[in-house]
Image (spheres, rainbow, N blue to C red):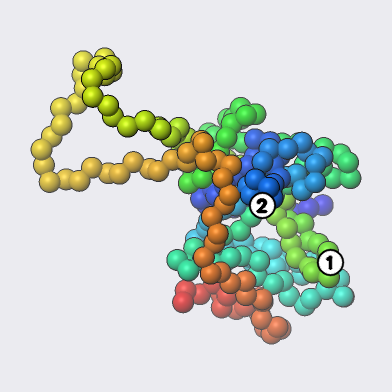
Amino acid sequence: MAESYIIEGVEALWPRIDQTYAFDKKANRSMPCGPREVNAEFSIQFRMDNPTAKALFKTMSDCYVANREDKWAEALANPFVKDDNGSITHKSSLKGAYNGQVTDTPAQYDSQGNTLAADFQLTTGSTVNVAVQLIPYDFGGKQGVSLRLKAVQVVKYVPMERSNPFGAVDGGFVMEDPNPFAATPKTNNVLAAKPAVAEDSDDMFEAEPVKKTASKAAAPASKGDLNDIVDSMFDDD
């Protein structure tokens, strides 16, 4: 039975959970597709801090060791990507179909555990918890532990906004504020907080930006204590 794990308090990156998507080379971006099409999958990349990455890798390593076969590499290689800014990213996905059998869409919940609508579209920048199943594998001579996507809980949602193609013009219609209790601007030296930048709905299928220089460090070949190995991999530079 696959081991379950919840990755808590991570930042969602390019989530595609409302339906299956596949990368289209001609369009140079991920596009919606049927669940049985080639490479069709639900997916979410996520950005996590060092303690979260360390705990996740420790759990994945334990799963790897518990299921390791003699021909497999001795230790699990670090699958995470560390960008130049120090952030650590990884991905969880679910194929649209396994052996011809269509999979269920991963469930999405709000912070109170209420089920979100089937067509709810999560946005980049939102804070989420990600429920996964750890699946050890040996494919093409490479071994690892994949994170099969099961569900997502939205802790903090960044609203989606439409881009405005128009600028201001002279004359014409100007909407009046119908609120008689509108706040009066105050004059002080306190800077207003900048609103969170929301994902643009018109750009949600744009090609993902190319990551900065990243490294995938293999786990040390030492047979020392796993906790020491994990500590050394995720110590701050």
- Residue at the disc numbered 1: 140
> 107 or 163: nearer the eye?
163
Q: Residues within 10 Å of mark 1 (few under 14, many from 20)?
A: few
Asked if one can make out residue 155 in the rendered structure from this viewpoint, the answer is: no
Tell me which amino acid carries mark 1: Gly
Label 1 residue SS = loop
Q: Nearer the viewer, residue 142 or 146?
A: 142
State whether residue 233 is above or below residue 100.
Answer: below
Total numbered labels placed on residues in the image: 2
Expressed as whole percent of the image width and height from the top left, the position of residue 37 reads 80, 41
Query: Residue lying farthest front?
Result: 170
Q: Is residue 57 visible?
A: yes
Instruction: For marks 2 and 1, give the CA distance.
Output: 20 Å
Report whether 100 appears left or right of 153: right
Q: Which residue is mark 2?
A: 92
Q: Amino acid at mark 2?
A: Ser
Q: Nearer the viewer, mark 2 or mark 1?
A: 1
The structure residue drawn at horizontal position 65% and vertical position 35%, both measured from the top left corner, is 18
How far across and down, in percent of the image, does residue 67 sit?
82, 65
Q: Is residue 56 above or below residue 207?
A: below
| Circles 2, 1 touching at the beta carbon (< 8 Å) | no
Is 84 located above or below residue 118 in the figure?
below
Picture coordinates of residue 219, whole percent (x, y)? 67, 76
Earlier-in-chain disc, 2 versus 1: 2
> Who's the residue at 78% across and 61% down the image?
136
Question: What is the crowding at mark 2: few (fewer than 14 residues within 10 Å), some, or many (at least 20)?
Answer: many
Question: Does 135 sit left or right of 231 as displayed?
Answer: right
Left or right of 147? Residue 100 is right
* Image quadrant assignment for residue 76: bottom right
